[in-house]
Image (cartoon, grey):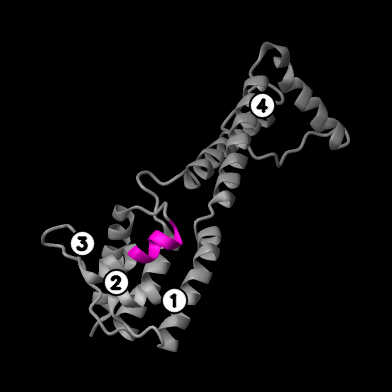
Amino acid sequence: FAKLSMQFAFESGDERIIRELRALFRRYPLDKRVLNDNSDEQEFRKRYQTLKLETERFRALLSSSEYEDLESDLSIAALHKNGGAADPDIPVIGGAEGRKGSAYLADLHYLLSLLLVAAESGSERFAPVKGRKRNFALENTVRRIAYIWSDEIKRPFTLDYHQGSGLTPAHEFVKTIFAKLDPEITENDVKTSMRRIVAERNSAEP
C-alpha cells in the first residue's frame, strides 16, 4: 500500500488505514461470491417453469379425445372409493353440472388452472431484473472505501456532479483501488456506485 499512500498523500505507517485496506482487499472476493450470486433465484425460476410446462401438458392430455370418457371414469372411481355411494359433499368449485363425474372433472380442470397461474406467477417473481443489475459487492466495497477516505484519511467523499466527470480525489482513490482489486470494474461502474454511496451518506447526515 506504499504506492497508494504516496499517490494520495496519507501516512503509509497508519495502522488503522492499512488494516482497513487489507480487510477491504480480503473481503471483496467473498462479497463478490456471496452478494452477487443469483443461482438460487435461477433455480427457483427453473422449477416454476418446469411446473408450468408439466401443468400445460397435463391439461392438454385431459382435453384430448383419448380421455373423452374420463367423466364416467371419475364417477366410477368415486363410487368405488365411497363403497358404492356417491359423495354428496363433493364441492363443485369449477361450476360444472350435468353428466355423472362432470363435477370431478370440472374441479380438476379448475385446480389445474390455479396451479398454472401460480407457476406463471412464481416464474415471473424470480425473473431477472430488467436493466443493469446492481453490483452489491461493488457497492459494499465502495462503502468501505468511503469510510476509509472520509473517516480515516479525513477527506470529503464526493463526485463532480456538475461536470459529470467524477474526477475528484475520492473518485480517483476508488478507481485506483479497483484497478488492482478487480480490473473488470469499469469507470462507469465506479461512478454509479459512488453516486449511490454519496447519496446514502448525505441522507444519513443530521
Who is closer to the viewer here, 58 or 8? 8
**Quadrant, the N terminus:** bottom left
Is 60 placed left or right of 73 in the picture? Answer: left
The picture places residue 100, in percent across and down from the top left corner, at: 71, 23
Does the segment drawn in magenta span residue 120? no
Q: Identify the residue under disc 2.
A: 200
* Count of residue discs: 4
Give the class, few, some or many, for how many residues have Cα within 10 Å of label 3's Cα (few <14, many ≥20): many
The picture places residue 40, in percent across and down from the top left corner, at: 59, 51
Q: Which mark is residue 44?
A: none
Q: Secondary structure at mark 3?
A: loop
Q: Identify the residue under disc 4.
A: 58
The picture places residue 136, in percent across and down from the top left corner, at: 43, 61
Residue at the image position 20 percent from the left and 61 percent from the top: 166
The magenta stretch spans which residues? 176-182
Q: Secondary structure at mark 2?
A: helix
Instruction: Give whichever of discs 3 and 2 has the lower sequence position.
Output: 3
Residue at the image position 66 percent from the left and 15 percent from the top: 64
Give the Cα separation between the discs numbered 1 and 3.
22 Å
Q: Identify the residue under disc 1.
A: 21
| Residue 191, above or below 71 | below
Give the Cα separation between the discs numbered 3 and 2.
17 Å
- Give, as a three-letter code, the residue at label 3: Gly
Q: In the image as oriented, which residue stretches furthest toward the left?
A: 162
